[in-house]
Image: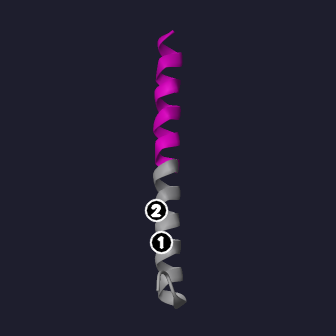
Amino acid sequence: RAGGGPEGARRAQARGEGQAAQGQAAQEAEGEREAREGEGL
């Protein structure tokens, strides 16, 4: 039984939050890099 009950729901939520946090960090890093390149021009 995959992901049955509240335990499975908690795990799925934690996994989703982790992926969202990674995506946000990647966007922030890319924004900083673009800002630095913009200043260099």
Which percent across, then down, holds residue 12? 51, 73
Magenta stretch, overall SS: helix
Q: Residue at x 52, y 41 (%)?
A: 27
Q: Which residue is mark 1?
A: 14
In the displayed structure, 40 sits above or below 5; it is above
What count of labels does the image hold?
Answer: 2
Callout 1 secondary element: helix
* Amino acid type, residue under disc 1 in the picture: Ala
15 part of magenta stretch? no
Q: Residue at x 49, y 34 (%)?
A: 30
Which percent across, then down, holds residue 36? 47, 23
In the displayed structure, 2 sits above or below 14; it is below
Q: Residue furthest front?
A: 1
Which percent across, then down, holds residue 8? 49, 82
Which percent across, then down, holds residue 29? 46, 38
Q: Residue at x 46, y 77 (%)?
A: 11
Distance (Cα) linking label 1 and label 2: 6 Å
What span is colored magenta in the figure? Answer: 24-41
Disc 2 crowd rating (10 Å Cα; few below 14, some 14-19, many 20+) is few
Q: Residue furthest bottom?
A: 5
Q: Which mark is residue 24?
A: none
Near-viewer residue (36 or 11): 11
Q: Residue furthest top?
A: 41
* Amino acid type, residue under disc 2 in the picture: Gly
Near-viewer residue (36 or 25): 25
Callout 2 secondary element: helix
> Which color scheme did the rendering employ for the protein?
one colour
In the displayed structure, 41 sits above or below 23; it is above
In the displayed structure, 17 sits above or below 30; it is below
Q: Are marks 1 and 2 in contact (CB under 8 Å)?
A: yes
Q: Which residue is mark 2?
A: 18
